[in-house]
Image (spheres, grey):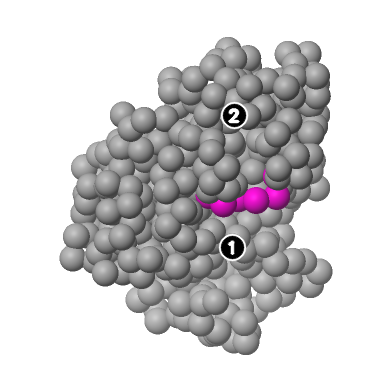
Amino acid sequence: MDGTENNILIHKTFHIEGGNFQNAGLISDQVKKILKEAGLPKKVIRRTSIATFEAEMNVICYAQRGNLSLFITPNFLKVVVEDEGHGIPDINLAMSDGYSTADEKIREWGFGAGMGLPNIRRNTDEMVLTSKFREGTHLEFIIYLDRQENMLPFE
Amino acid sequence: MTLKEVKETTNAEVISGDHDLKKEIKCAFAAELLSDVLALSQEGALLITGFTHPQVVYAADAANLCAILFVRGRWPNEATQQLAIQKKIPLLSTSYMMFETCGLLYEYGLKTCALKTENGRDGK
Amino acid sequence: MTVADIVKNFGLQTRAGRERLLEEVTGGYASDLLSDVIAHSRKGNIWITIQTHPNIVAVATMKELAGIILAGGREPDADTIQKAEEEEIPILISPLFTFELVGKLYQIGISGMSPC
């Protein structure tokens, strides 16, 4: 539908272990390296890094395990995160600023302010989130490489 | 305000990056929850935090922050320090509490950073 | 200086604990890490945080804090408000981010604690 299959220049998949707070940030860091090496615009790299970090954290905080896949085509990059876990019972609620189901451990690690999903939405051009309660969550987001605002320097 | 002035105002020690003290700090943000760090968007931003796990460096790097000042005498572990050196993010530590640290820097004239809260991404 | 003075000075909105606004404020404490607040805050401190869940009330009660100011326009959870009313802990909200809010409190004379 979005032509991903036909135009993939780079495709990489990473495994995320749920509950492994020690490793938090490692995957999004590797994604950032790939984007830097691919010579993508700074703003694209920053937005992707932030969205990927949040997505990685969600798997670590709330799921048993997950996979994060990065696709880069000439026109956009796409990240797909699939996890196994208890899922999200109410997606609209989960998308609202400040809503959080974090427990003590999560907060101890500096997460759980309820800004993750809204933050992903703010930093991406397209976002799709689906969940099957008690099975897991599927997140996809796209950042266009040829959009004006993604080429601008930082404010 | 330069990083050197931040150091002097808060009596901070430099953990790493002492060649970078001339860096210009445009604004400051106090955050201990990493999502807040990730919501920051400004270049030249100083992160003031008590959170010393390596994740704070990953988050600062993802958000392109300028430097990190740890409060309450918090000192990051080796892993955090190494990561910060690799990412070229200077680290400092002050024994002042968060409250006092913010107070001193604000009094000096450092402004608060703006969070990225634009709604432009809603509605495709 | 009382909590009420701070409310008035900053135009803060009160979400709970109105009956305890005349508490004297002994100083300010800013942290989002609960273990930290438990370890270092002092009785009568006004606590600035962005945490909005009911545990903040438990901590404030335990440490006998004067009140909690939620920064950055955060709103307390419904459970938090309920608990705060029960424990009579003032919960106030400010649109300012922590750095600026603390900066301004500092300017009107609320102090933090001496260095560790």
Q: Position of residue A30 (x, y in %)?
A: 38, 60
Query: What's the chain of the residue with tag 2?
Result: C
Q: Which mark is residue C46?
A: 2
Q: Which residue is mark 1?
A: B114
Residue B60 located within the stretch drawn in magenta: no
Q: On the rendered structure, is B18 left or right of C45?
A: left
Q: In which quadrant of the rendered image does the C terminus of chain B lie?
A: bottom right
Residue at 51%, 82% (x, y): give it: A153
Q: Amino acid type of disc 1?
A: Ala
Residue A145, by quadrant, is bottom right
Q: Quick check: can you spot residue B42? A: yes
Q: Position of residue A21 (x, y in %)?
A: 43, 37
Q: Position of residue B119 (x, y in %)?
A: 74, 66
Q: In which quadrant of the rendered image does the N terminus of chain B lie?
A: bottom left
Residue at 43%, 40% (x, y): give it: B100
Viewer-nearest of discs 1 and 2: 2
Magenta stretch: give its range: C94-100
Q: Nearer the viewer, residue C27 or A130?
A: C27
Element class at badge 2: strand
Q: Amino acid type of disc 2?
A: Ile
Rendered view: A143 above or below C114: below
Rendered view: A115 above or below C114: below
Q: CA gap, disc 1 to disc 2?
A: 24 Å
Could you classify mark 2 by the number of other residues whose Cα lies within 10 Å: few (under 14), some (14-19), or many (20 or more)? many
Query: What's the chain of the residue with tag 1?
Result: B
Q: Which mark is residue A64?
A: none
Residue at 73%, 13% (x, y): give it: C87
Element class at badge 1: loop
Q: Quick check: can you spot residue A62? A: no
Q: Nearer the viewer, residue C39 or A115?
A: C39
